[in-house]
Amino acid sequence: MANVSSSNGLEKRPKLRFPGFDEPWKPIAFGDLVHEFSDRTTEEDEDTLLSAAIEGMFLNTELFGHQRGASNKGYKKIKYGTMVLSTQNLHLGNANVNQRFTHGMVSPAYKTYNITGCSVGLIAQWIKSEAAKRFFYNATTVGASVCRRNVEWETLYEQPLYLPCIEEQEEIAKFLTLLSDRINKQQQFVSSLKKYKRGALKAVFTQQVSFSAKPQKWDKYKMGDLISLQSGQDFAPAEYNDQEIGVPYMTGASCIVKGETVVSRWTQTPRCYAYKGDTLLVCKGSGSGAVVRLTQEKVHIARQFMSLRANEKMTSDFCYYLTGFLSDRIKRNATGLIEGIDRGTVLNQTVFLPLLHEQKKIARFFSKLDFTITAHENMLDTLINERTGLMQRLFI
C-alpha cells in the first residue's frame, strides 16, 4: 500500500491506497447504495432473536440474558449481509452489517436494508469506522435530551458516500476482513483464557486440585478471622483536587482500568487508608463486586470501596485471588436500591485455607496466568489500534 494525497481540487482520495489504484473516489448518495425492506415474522419465535449493538450483532440472550419479551410476532427478518441501523443510537455507532448469523429476526425498532451497487464486505468494514460514525452523526439533529439525537432519514439518504471502483472496494474489504478475523480470534483466545481462569479458581478454592505434594486438609475460617477490613468515606468536592496534591483518592469502579488501579483525584485530608498490596472490593454502585489489587503505595478510599488486608495466616496475594473467587457469592447478597455489599457479608464468609507454602504456590500459578492474560489483552489492543489507524487512512 502507498501513501497518497487525500485530495486534489474537488477530487477525493484516501491517504492510503493499494498498488494499481489511483483514480479519485466518486460520491454516491447513500440512498442509492441501500434498499430498505421490512420482511416481518408471522408467528411467535419464528426465528432466532438477535440484537444490534455498537459492538456488533448478538444473540438477544448474550446481551440481556433472556430470550424474548411479551411477543416477537411481527419482528423483522434479516439474513447474512443485511444492514441494521438503530433509530435511537445511530449517532453513537449502532450500525451493523450482519456477518455473524445466517438469518434471524430483530426488533421492528431497527431499520433493515439490502446493500446494492457496492461491496457488502467493504460496507461491513466501513460501517464500524470513525468515518461512518461521523457520516451518520451528520444526518442527526438535537433530540428531546442532551444524549438523544433524531435521525433525519432523507438527509442521510442524500448524503454522498465516497467509494472507489468495485475492484478496489474488494481489495480493501479482503484486507480489513482478514485483519478483523485476526482480531476476532484474539478476542476468542482472551475469552477462553479468562474462562479457564474462572474454572481454575473454582477448582482450587473448592479443593478439587492440590498444589501440595502431600495434599492436606484446608482449615475452616470466617473471612473476618483472616483480614482487617477498612471501609471508605466520601469527600465533598472542596476536599479533593486533580492537581496531584496530597494522597491519591480512589472513588470507585472507574478507578479500575484493565485490572489495574488508576488515580485521577487527590486529597490533603485522607482518613480511610488502603496500602499497596491490599485487595480492594467495589462494594457499592456500578461495578459492585469487582476486585483489584492496589498498586499505589497509599490511598484514601471512598465508600464505594472496602480494603481487605490479610493477617499473618494468609498472604496478600492469596487474599486477592480468594476474594476474586468469593466475589460472585458476596455480590449475590448485595442489597438496597443502589446495590451495596455490607461489611458483615464479607466478614462472615466461610472459607477454607491451606498452609502458607501452598498459598504461595497457588498465588504464583494465578499470577502467571494473569500475566499471560494481560499479554494477550495488550496484543488485542495493538491489533484494534492498528485496524483503527488503517481505517482512518483507507476511508474518506
Image (spheres, rainbow, N blue to C red):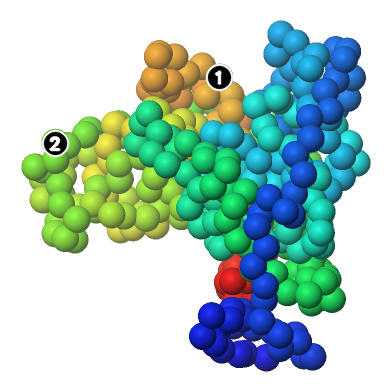
Is residue 258 toward the left or the right of residue 255 in the image? right
Is residue 12 toward the left or the right of residue 256 in the image? right
Dot 1 amino acid type: Arg
Pointer 2 residue: 236
Crowd class of label 1 (few under 14; some 14 to 19; many from 20; radius 10 Å):
few
Instruction: Classify residue 141 by image quadrant.
Output: top left
Please state the horizontal and vertical placement of residue 257, each as a whole percent of the image: 46, 52
From the viewer's side, name the closer residue of 83 and 264. Answer: 83
Placement of the N terminus among the 4 image quadrants: bottom right
Please state the horizontal and vertical placement of residue 162, each as a whole percent of the image: 64, 68
Please state the horizontal and vertical placement of residue 204, each as a whole percent of the image: 71, 40
* Secondary structure found at label 1: helix
Depicted 153 relative to depicted 349: above or below:
below
Depicted 67 relative to depicted 87: above or below:
above
Please state the horizontal and vertical placement of residue 49, each as a whole percent of the image: 79, 26
Pointer 1 residue: 332
